[in-house]
């Protein structure tokens, strides 16, 4: 209750409720769902609803670390009189007590109660199925997080992760088109969400079979998690013993001149060695490709608005979690910047340059992906508008993120692949800003359809230039605030102070 994760979970709960209310209001989903239940398709409605909750929890937990980051390590639990298996159980009990999982348990229970109130299924059997589905959801998130953690720690793990993400996202369009295929339908009915839906909605033998599917998934995920946790990562620790001061990173740093070149190379080298950065940054483009595929479908409403949202999101998603807490992973190493023959605020500016360039570097690749996946007519002006919107969002986001690094810094764990180390202000800017960039164009297209249109392509490049000017102005004024607060930030990173809150 005292941890910042509780406050962040409340923010996430409010966001999910807002998005759900907006979705129901825009597509009349509540009335359509009730009509489908009355028409005898209650199991399908329940399966789709539970699958949406299941996938949302997996995405948010892996993207933010809620509910999957170890609060107590095995070495810390050894201080207590617990056996080995008791320590494992204690770790997972503490993990599942995270406010994040309490939120999704409430969503699952609400879905089951609503279906029961609509006159389908038995209450107690549905309650058992929901609790078992919730446990399997937690174990699935833990297993995926552990698998990604083991992969990214090994040499070449980033490339393996990109291939795995592509292997998951590329077949999705074909599965959507082949939803009437018997094999696809069989896979759908074998999922734990479909089994839980059958246990909630149906009675007799079909309900028992659905409950058996959920139990089978629960046991299988538990076995996979035990196997992953019992096998540590095999890291290639062989070193050449040769130091290279003119590597690719140093050549990139040299592009920023003699004043910032060494600092830029330092930040690039520092974060490219971070497991969490190497896991999140490559996943931005597969997420963009999936969103563009959905936007390009003929049945999608406001496809151009979704394209703008995707371009606005990709550059911020790639490096946003680190841009809002630039110094959070340095610990006591921040004092080294005071020994350099330059102003200490130069480190802030160089780090902001790194994250802005890394975010902007995804825009040209995203434009190429858009040209390959977009299935509707377009011209060069449309592509210019999308690229300009992408650059504008990158500059605006990082212009605000530099203030969060100064006023809302928090101490992070450099060696943790998943987790949420951000302060409340950092999460408001990181998560809230990302959600605003995605929801903003779609809401404008719904209520002011004339604004979000390729006819206004001429306004996008000046908007990107204005955003760039605002970014440099924000960075200039943030340097003075950093000089005034650098001692507080160093005390926080060294563990001698509490979380820095804006205005204090």
Image (cartoon, helix red, strand yellow):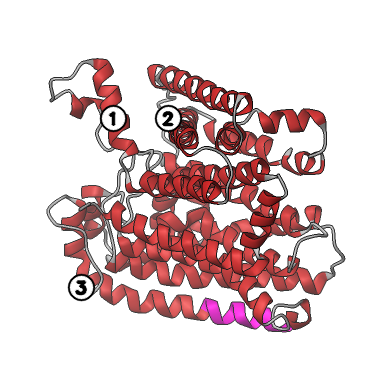
Region of the chain picked out in magenta, as a range: 458-468
Q: Is residue 100 visible?
A: yes
Q: Is residue 247 above or below residue 216?
A: below
Residue 460 covered by magenta stretch = yes
Task: Please say if the residues under marks 3 and 1 sit with CB atoms less than 8 Å apart.
Answer: no
Residue indicated by mark 3: 484
Q: Depth-wise, is mark 3 or mark 1 nearer the camera?
A: 1
Of the image marks 1 and 2, the number of the one nearer the N terminus? 1
Q: Depth-wise, is mark 1 or mark 2 nearer the camera?
A: 1
Residue at (61%, 81%) from the top-left corner? 463
Coordinates of residue 154 in the picture (x, y in percent)? 47, 27
Residue extending furthest right?
Answer: 377
Please tell me how crowded label 3 is: few (under 14), some (14-19), or many (20+) other residues with Cα within 10 Å.
few
* Quarter location, residue 424: bottom left
Of the image marks 2 and 3, the number of the one nearer the N terminus? 2
How many angstroms separate mark 3 from mark 1 (CA)? Answer: 41 Å
Mark 3 residue element: helix
Indicate which disc residue 242 carries: 2
Residue indicated by mark 1: 91
Q: Please name the predominant secondary structure of the magenta segment in the image.
A: helix
Please tell me how crowded label 1 is: few (under 14), some (14-19), or many (20+) other residues with Cα within 10 Å.
some
* Quarter location, residue 43: top right
Coordinates of residue 429 in the picture (x, y in percent)? 41, 66
How many angstroms separate mark 1 from mark 2 (CA)? Answer: 41 Å
Indicate which disc residue 411 carries: none
Q: Is residue 60 above or below residue 410?
A: above
Of the image marks 3 and 1, the number of the one nearer the N terminus? 1
Identify which residue, 145 or 238, lies in the foreground.
145
Mark 1 residue element: helix
């Amino acid at each position: 209750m005292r941890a910042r994760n509780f406050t962040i979970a409340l923010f996430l709960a409010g966001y999910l409720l807002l998005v759900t209310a907006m979705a129901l209001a825009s597509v009349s989903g509540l009335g359509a769902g009730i009509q489908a239940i009355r028409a005898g398709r209650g199991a399908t409605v329940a399966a789709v609803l539970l699958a949406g909750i299941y996938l949302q929890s997996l995405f948010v937990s892996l993207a933010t670390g809620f509910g999957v980051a170890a609060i107590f390590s095995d070495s810390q639990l050894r201080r207590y009189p617990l056996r080995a298996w008791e320590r494992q159980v204690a770790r997972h009990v503490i993990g599942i007590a995270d406010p994040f999982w309490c939120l999704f348990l409430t969503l699952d229970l609400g879905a089951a109660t609503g279906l029961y109130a609509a006159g389908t299924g038995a209450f107690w059997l549905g309650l058992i199925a929901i609790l078992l589905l919730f446990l399997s959801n937690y174990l699935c998130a833990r297993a995926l997080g552990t698998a990604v953690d083991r992969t990214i720690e090994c040499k070449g793990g980033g490339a393996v992760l990109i291939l795995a993400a592509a292997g998951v996202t590329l077949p999705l369009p074909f599965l959507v088109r082949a939803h009437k295929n018997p094999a696809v339908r069989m896979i759908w009915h074998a999922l734990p969400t479909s089994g839980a839906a059958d246990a909630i909605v149906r009675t007799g033998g079909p309900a028992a079979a659905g409950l058996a599917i959920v139990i089978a998934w629960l046991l299988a995920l538990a076995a996979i998690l035990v196997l992953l946790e019992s096998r540590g990562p095999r890291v290639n620790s062989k070193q050449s013993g040769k130091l290279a001061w003119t590597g690719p990173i140093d050549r990139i740093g040299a592009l920023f001149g003699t004043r910032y070149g060494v600092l830029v190379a330092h930040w690039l080298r520092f974060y490219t060695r971070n497991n969490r950065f190497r896991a999140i940054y490559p996943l931005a483009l597969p997420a963009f490709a999936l969103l563009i595929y959905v936007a390009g479908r003929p049945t999608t409403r406001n496809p151009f608005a979704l394209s703008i949202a995707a371009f606005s999101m990709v550059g911020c998603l790639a490096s946003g979690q680190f841009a809002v807490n630039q110094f959070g992973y340095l610990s006591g190493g921040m004092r080294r910047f005071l020994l350099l023959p330059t102003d200490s605020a130069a480190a802030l500016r160089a780090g902001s340059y790194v994250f802005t360039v890394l975010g902007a570097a995804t825009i040209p690749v995203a434009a190429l992906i858009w040209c390959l996946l977009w299935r509707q007519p377009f011209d060069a002006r449309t592509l210019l508008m999308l690229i300009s919107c992408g650059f504008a969002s990158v500059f605006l986001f990082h212009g605000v993120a530099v203030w969060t690094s100064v006023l809302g810094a928090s101490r992070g764990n450099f060696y943790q692949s998943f987790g949420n180390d951000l302060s409340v202000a950092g999460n408001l800017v990181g998560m809230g800003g990302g959600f605003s960039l995605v929801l903003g164009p779609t809401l404008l297209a719904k209520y002011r359809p004339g604004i979000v249109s390729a006819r206004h392509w001429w306004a996008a490049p000046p908007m990107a230039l204005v955003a760039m000017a605002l970014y440099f102005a924000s960075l200039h004024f943030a340097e003075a605030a950093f000089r005034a607060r650098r001692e507080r930030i160093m005390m926080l990173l060294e563990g001698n102070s509490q979380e820095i809150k804006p205005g204090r």
